[in-house]
Image (cartoon, grey):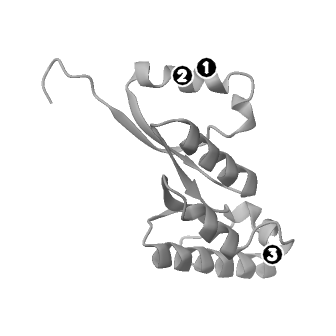
C-alpha cells in the first residue's frame, strides 16, 4: 500500500438486517464506500436474517452473505421454520460465502435438553459447511468446553 492509497476495509461480520437499521438502512449502506468499506458479509442469525443477507448480497455489488441460525434461535429448527435443506438451498446461492452465525451460547441456552439440541444443530450446520466447502462463522459464549 502506498501512502496515497485509501485502505479498504472488508467487514466480515455485519448485521445490517437488524431492526436498528430500519429507519436509515439505505443511507447507511450508501455511505459505507465513502468510509473505506470495500466489502461486507452480512451474517444471518435466523431465517429472517439469512433471507435478508441474501437480499442484500443480490442488491449491492459489494455485499456478500452468510446463511445460518444463531444458537439462541435454534427453536426455528424445532418448530420447522428452518431446516438444513433450506439452509443448503440459501447457502448455495451466488455471493453466499459462509455458514453462520452458528455455534453454542450457554449464557442464553440454559437447560441440558436445550443445550443438547443446540449442540446437535451446531453439528448439523458444521456438516453443511463442510459439505458445501464453506467456512463457518462460529459464535461461542460460555460454551468453550463443548
Residue contact at pointers 2 and 1, CB within 8 angstroms: yes
Label 2 to label 1: alpha-carbon separation? 5 Å
Residue name at image x 67 percent, y 75 percent: 85
Residue 135: image quadrant is bottom left
- Image: 39 above or below 82: above
Residue located beneath label 1 in the image = 27
Q: Nearer the viewer, residue 15 or 119?
A: 15
Residue name at image x 54 percent, y 50 percent: 65
In percent of width and height, residue 134 lies at: 45, 67
Q: Is residue 35 left or right of residue 122?
A: left
Q: Is residue 1 left or right of residue 88?
A: left
Q: Secondary structure at mark 3?
A: loop
Q: Is residue 89 left or right of residue 2?
A: right
Residue located beneath label 2 in the image = 30
How busy is the neighbourhood of tag 1: few (under 14 within 10 Å), some, or many (20 plus)? few
Q: Earlier in the sequence, mark 3 or mark 2?
A: 2
Label 3 to label 2: alpha-carbon separation? 43 Å
* Residue found at the far left of this picture: 2
Residue name at image x 73 percent, y 57 percent: 47
Label 3 to label 1: alpha-carbon separation? 42 Å
* Marks 3, 1: nearer the viewer: 1
Residue located beneath label 3 in the image = 111
Q: How many numbered badges does the structure rendering display? A: 3
In percent of width and height, residue 10 lies at: 39, 39
Residue 104 in view: no
Amino acid at each position: 500500500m502506498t501512502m496515497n492509497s485509501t485502505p479498504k476495509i472488508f467487514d466480515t461480520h455485519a448485521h445490517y438486517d437488524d431492526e436498528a437499521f430500519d429507519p436509515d438502512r439505505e443511507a447507511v449502506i450508501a455511505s459505507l464506500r465513502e468510509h473505506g468499506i470495500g466489502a461486507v458479509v452480512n451474517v444471518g442469525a435466523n431465517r429472517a436474517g439469512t433471507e435478508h443477507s441474501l437480499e442484500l448480497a443480490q442488491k449491492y455489488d459489494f455485499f456478500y452473505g452468510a446463511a445460518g441460525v444463531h444458537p439462541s434461535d435454534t427453536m426455528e429448527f424445532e418448530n420447522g421454520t428452518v431446516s438444513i435443506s433450506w439452509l443448503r438451498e440459501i447457502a448455495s446461492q451466488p455471493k453466499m460465502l459462509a455458514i453462520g452465525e452458528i455455534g453454542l451460547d450457554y449464557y442464553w441456552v440454559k437447560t441440558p435438553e436445550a443445550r443438547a439440541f443446540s449442540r446437535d444443530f451446531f453439528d448439523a450446520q458444521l456438516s453443511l459447511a463442510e459439505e458445501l466447502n464453506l467456512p463457518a462463522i462460529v459464535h461461542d459464549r460460555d460454551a468453550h468446553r463443548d
